[in-house]
Amino acid sequence: MTSAKRSSPAAATKTNFDAIIIGAGFSGMYMLHSLRDKLDLNATVFEAGDGVGGTWYWNRYPGARCDSDSYVYCYTFDKNLLQEWNWSERYPEQDEILRYLEHCAERFDLKPDIQFGKRVVEATFDDQTQLWTVRTDKGDVATARFVITAVGALSTANIPQFKGFNSFKGKCYHTSQWPHDGVDFTAKRVGVIGTGATAVQAIPEIAQQAKHLTVFQRTPAFCVPARNGNVDPEVTKARKADYDGIRQRIKDSFFGFELNFMPKSVLETTPEEREQEFDRMWDTGGFSFWLANYQDMFFSKEANDVIADYLKRKIRSTVNDPVVAGKLTPTNYPYGTKRQPLDTNYFETFNKKNVELVDANTDGAIEEITPNGIRAGSKEYPLDIIVVATGFDALTGPVKQLGIKGRGGRVLAEEWAEGPQTYLGVAVAGYPNLFMITGPQSPSVLSNMPVSIEQHVEWISECIAHMRRSKLAAIEATSQAQEAWGAHVAEVVNATLMTGANSWYMGANIEGKVRRFLPYLGPEGVGGYRRKCAEVAEKGYEGFVFTAHDQTARPIAA
Ligand code: NA7
């Protein structure tokens, strides 16, 4: 921790930096701390929001909370911070996570080097100077040797262009652009579009307030109970005593949690034996049903069906009306191949008298938004408020919208038209000194995000430190390494059932987006990916080429 508060001139008055970081969420904040306080670099952050927090700054819809257990959904790089902070719940609410990130910003004195309310609209690499020029929507022009995107994987809202959208006379909110002073649903007729992880959290909360709630479902979700609750102080104490061990285990794990698949095929078990295991995972709640189930769940359709059947039976036994239960039961994709929503009374909510389900397949898809509501299946549903819970242009969306231009004026958004092309999900050929934290083709959203964020931040920091020690001006992925990585990402996922769903992992939620698996599902998970990245560095950054500093180049500072 820095001992004294910074008294340097406000970052906004400087225009030349060693590094420009885009975004001040979990990743941008740690990146700033690492470059500024550990490497003593001259770094700044451009952040579109008016505060830190990223996802947790924007997503303020009712019921918004984390789906990772709080004791691992946090920074682990600072032992004192781990000891100081106490989470109240197993899955903290949005405002508690935001308070945590605010605390971290204060603790590490980050704010003087974050420029709030500034959205990056262009980043251009200059082949001569080997510097990036970054522009914001507020007219800032700044240069830097390194640009690091810390924009998150789920930060570009997907707002489907329904016919008549602008004609609606009531209020309409996307869940990731929620008013800071909240929305009062009392005595209102509310429509929620979508039934993904966000809607599964929001629907039970909204149903408690609204006069009438209509849920517009395109694809039903497999849900598992979160089983949220306060954390027993004794459990917290034991975890704090064991944080070195926890940190190591989540770093070496498959998904960044203390969860591992059962080393057994579900098809080799008796019905009684597996029912007992399913009950155990169901009662435990959280991601264990998804990420610590039988090991063939993601590989064999037959195995997957056995597991999915348990969850389908749970829907039928929870929802009173068999017709509604049928509509809420997924039928057209393997379990686990879409992001697992964790629920608290989601299916129970459909037993309430004021809640109605409009299913695109059986009742009819949304045709248009009218001045008074939503028309679906030729019927108009009158509404006062529409909640658009339709998710995000995941992984590639946030990077593509930065206006990145690389060597020779090449445009990243154009080069990614057919899907992302990266090396390790952290760098792109043709874009020297550009790093992406949890970019596409890295484990990112298939892991507990802070674990992957810390790994990338530390790898990028060490790479920059290496360049400074070795007097290197630029690092760039080779196109051969990039092609091989892309082929590897595809090969690994093609051996699983993951490509069999219209998921946002596949880009299938966005009209016109190329269907391509976007994150990296490494054969050994985040642990194996970490080892791969370390090995690349140990081999002198295999798959990258460096440009040496010449006399004219601006040195990396300090
Ligand atoms: P998701 O998981 O992408 O869910 C969005 C939901 O909206 C999903 O049910 C979609 O149906 C539905 N959707 C999307 N576009 C449309 C249109 N055009 N018409 C009707 N319905 C639509 O986003 P979330 O915000 O819930 O979760 C995103 C992640 O944030 C979450 O997984 C966590 O990691 C945090 P579909 O299934 O595509 O048919």
Image: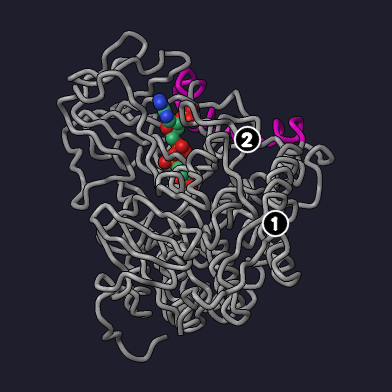
User: Magenta stretch: dominant SS?
Assistant: helix
Could you say where residue 451 lies in the image, as x and y percent from the top left? 56, 64
Query: In the image, which residues are magenta?
Result: 300-326
In the figure, 380 relative to 199: above or below? above
Could you say where residue 412 lies in the image, as x and y percent from the top left? 50, 45
Q: Which type of secondary structure does the marked residue at label 1 adopt?
A: loop
**Label 2, ligand 1: CB separation under 8 Å:** no
Residue type at mark 1 is Asn
Residue type at mark 2 is Tyr
Q: Which type of secondary structure does the marked residue at label 2 adopt?
A: loop
| Mark drawn on residue 335 | 2
Residue 187 seen anywhere in this rendered image of the structure: yes
* 54 or 546: nearer the viewer: 546
Q: Earlier in the sequence, mark 2 or mark 1?
A: 1
Could you say where residue 438 lies in the image, as x and y percent from the top left? 54, 56
In the figure, 351 relative to 522: above or below? above
463 with respect to 497 (left or right): left
Query: What residue appears at the point 30 percent right and 61 percent down from the top-left corner?
Result: 141
Query: What residue appears at the point 46 percent right and 70 percent down from the top-left corner?
Result: 31
| Mark drawn on residue 260 | 1
